Image (tube, rainbow, N blue to C red):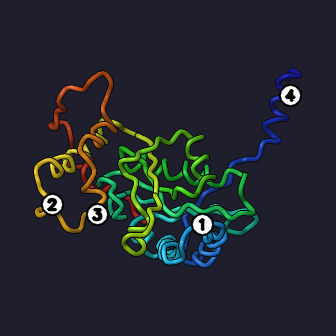
């Protein structure tokens, strides 16, 4: 082995390996909740309590996350240090994602474990599950005040999708409170299938009025101009009319993945 080879091997040996990710079990729930509380405590003073408390309760609802998806944890020294929920069908969150897209929720890393790649491996594991389930897009929201998380997502190459942003204050608290934005990021895994998944929503936006739309759909979702949806996935140069015949029910339906 040459000197350069030896140096490379030594550097690789010193480089910390990625922490392993595994599926959570119910016995992990108390430890997961402790990680979430430790990770989110720093934000408690940044927004009003009547907004933060229901928001945190939503994040802590592990039973709901488990019903709709898969709970992932990272351990270090025998303790849970990171957590994330993977949703194979993002639309069940009620946050405006199209059916068939995959999503992550409630990403949390214990403050003592930050800087060791825990969030990165949880995101990578969720993306891998999204690809395996056939989802065309992996998407998630983060709060506008979580600046450290935003920096990480942008370094990892996730793309902003402002057409999916929503107001946390309106969702979790009183009407008329100052807006607190939950901002959307995504990565396209199969752009042509992502465009197919949007067809039903474009049709609904362009052919119905506010009295005939489904009342279960979030108001901020229905208010998005169709142009924003089109712009999000428009190819370059100027696209020709899309041929819907190539879109399958698999794209529009929920991705199948057991919890």
Task: Tell me which numbered mark, 1 or 4, is placed earlier along the sequence.
Answer: 4
Q: Compute the Cα span from label 4 to label 2.
A: 68 Å
Q: Nearer the viewer, mark 2 or mark 3?
A: 2
In which quadrant of the rendered view does residue 108 lie? bottom right
Q: What residue appears at the point 47 percent right and 57 percent down from the top-left corner?
A: 104
Quick check: 150 left or right of 101? Answer: right
In percent of width and height, residue 37 lies at 62, 73
Question: Helix, strand, or loop for circle 1?
Answer: loop
Residue 46's mark? 1
Question: Helix, strand, or loop for circle 3?
Answer: loop
Q: Compute the Cα span from label 4 to label 3.
A: 58 Å
Image height of 99 relative to 234, above or below: below
Which is more toward the observer, 91 or 189? 91
**Image marks 2 and 1: residues in contact by CB distance under 8 Å:** no
Residue 218's mark? 3
In percent of width and height, residue 140 lies at 45, 54
Task: Tell me which numbered mark, 2 or 3, is placed earlier along the sequence.
Answer: 2
Q: Compute the Cα span from label 1 to label 3.
A: 25 Å
Q: Quadrant of the N terminus?
A: top right
Question: Helix, strand, or loop for circle 2?
Answer: loop
Task: Tell me which numbered mark, 2 or 1, is placed earlier along the sequence.
Answer: 1
Residue underneath mark 4: 6
Q: Residues within 10 Å of mark 1 (few under 14, many from 20)?
A: few
Task: Tell me which numbered mark, 4 or 3, is placed earlier along the sequence.
Answer: 4
Residue underneath mark 2: 210
């Amino acid at each position: 082995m040459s000197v350069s080879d030896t140096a490379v091997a030594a550097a690789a040996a010193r480089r910390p390996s990625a922490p392993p990710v595994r599926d959570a079990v119910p016995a992990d729930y108390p430890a997961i909740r402790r990680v979430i509380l430790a990770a989110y405590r720093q934000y408690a003073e940044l927004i009003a309590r009547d907004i933060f408390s229901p928001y945190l309760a939503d994040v802590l609802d592990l039973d709901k996350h488990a019903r709709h998806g898969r709970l992932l944890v990272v351990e270090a020294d025998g303790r849970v240090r990171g957590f994330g929920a993977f949703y194979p069908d993002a639309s069940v969150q009620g946050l405006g994602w199209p059916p068939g897209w995959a999503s992550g929720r409630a990403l949390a890393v214990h403050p003592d474990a930050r800087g060791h790649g825990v969030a990165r491996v949880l995101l990578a594991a969720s993306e891998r599950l999204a690809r395996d389930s056939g989802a065309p897009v992996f998407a998630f929201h983060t709060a506008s005040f979580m600046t450290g998380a935003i920096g990480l997502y942008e370094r990892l190459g996730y793309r902003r999708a402002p057409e999916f942003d929503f107001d946390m204050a309106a969702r979790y608290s009183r009407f008329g409170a100052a807006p607190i934005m939950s901002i959307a990021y995504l990565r396209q895994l199969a752009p042509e299938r992502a465009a197919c998944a949007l067809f039903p929503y474009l049709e609904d936006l362009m052919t119905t009025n506010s009295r005939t739309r489904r009342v279960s759909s979030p108001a901020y979702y229905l208010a998005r101009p169709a142009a924003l949806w089109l712009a999000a996935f428009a190819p370059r140069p100027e696209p020709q009319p899309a041929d819907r015949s190539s879109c399958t029910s698999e794209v529009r339906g929920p991705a199948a993945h057991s919890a």
